[in-house]
Image (cartoon, coloured by chain):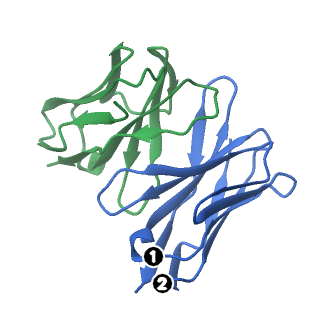
Chain colours: A blue, B green
Amino acid sequence: GENVEQHPSTLSVQEGDSAVIKCTYSDSASNYFPWYKQELGKRPQLIIDIRSNVGEKKDQRIAVTLNKTAKHFSLHITETQPEDSAVYFCAATSSGGYQKVTFGIGTKLQVIP
Amino acid sequence: DTEVTQTPKHLVMGMTNKKSLKCEQHMGHRAMYWYKQKAKKPPELMFVYSYEKLSINESVPSRFSPECPNSSLLNLHLHALQPEDSALYLCASSQAPGTFYGYTFGSGTRLTVV
């Protein structure tokens, strides 16, 4: 089955700095990679996603890059703000048949004002 | 309506009790999921329903029994749970299985087994 590794497990940055979270996956059949943000005590929320036929996608201060050859993808947050503090989960999905999502272990991001 | 609604938000039950968790969505999503999440861990897949049929059971103990009465509703029936089953239970939905859409998660039911 799919295995998704995520690092770092914790990340502290100063407000205004950038944050980068990296993930690797094992199954070459995975072709959809969502990122979820989970604030303390709340539900995970989809913040950005990327399909395997795309190398990069950006949405305001958030961007995701995908390297299919190396089987790794990354989340980049620029100009971080205190409200970016949360746990971020990467995930890999094999489409076709039943959509089974494998999550990374999560990265706890703390943005220091 | 762009939400997944879960009830109850909190539940405390004894090990001999029978209770049910409910999940509802009106987005026309045809795939629905139950996840279990322990503190400081990622969500862990339990069940997948695709077009109201159970398609994945991740070797979940039989004390958890899912049910999908229709395309908008998903239940999780609980019986004879153990204290280690205490966790946040998340329901999620997506447009259809095998497609490139992320999940919409509900707020979860925080379950405590005493």
Towards the viewer: B29 or B43: B29
Q: Mark 1 lies on which chain?
A: A
Q: Do the residues labelled 2 and 1 touch (CB within 8 Å)?
A: yes
In the rendering, which numbered label is found on residue A81? Answer: 1
Q: How far is disc 2 from disc 1 in space, using C-alphas?
A: 5 Å
Location of residue A82 with respect to B16 vertically, above or below: below
Residue B73: name its quadrant.
top left
**Which residue is labeled 2 in the image?**
A15
* Residue in the picture at 49% in, 38% down: B103
Amino acid on which the number 1 mark rests in the picture: Gln
Quarter holding the C terminus of chain A is: bottom left
* Residue in the picture at 26% in, 35% down: B6
Q: Position of residue B83 (x, y in %)?
A: 23, 49
Q: Which chain carries label 2?
A: A
The answer to whether dots 2 and 1 both sit on one chain is yes
Residue A69: name its quadrant.
bottom right
Position of B82 compared to B3: left or right? left
Q: How crowded is mark 2: few (under 14 residues within 10 Å), some or many (20 or more)?
A: some
Q: Residues within 10 Å of mark 1 (few under 14, many from 20)?
A: some
In the rendering, which numbered label is found on residue A71? Answer: none
* Residue in the picture at 34% in, 30% down: B1
Amino acid on which the number 2 mark rests in the picture: Glu
Quarter holding the N terminus of chain A is: top right
Towards the viewer: B28 or B72: B28
Q: Position of residue A24 (x, y in %)?
A: 71, 59
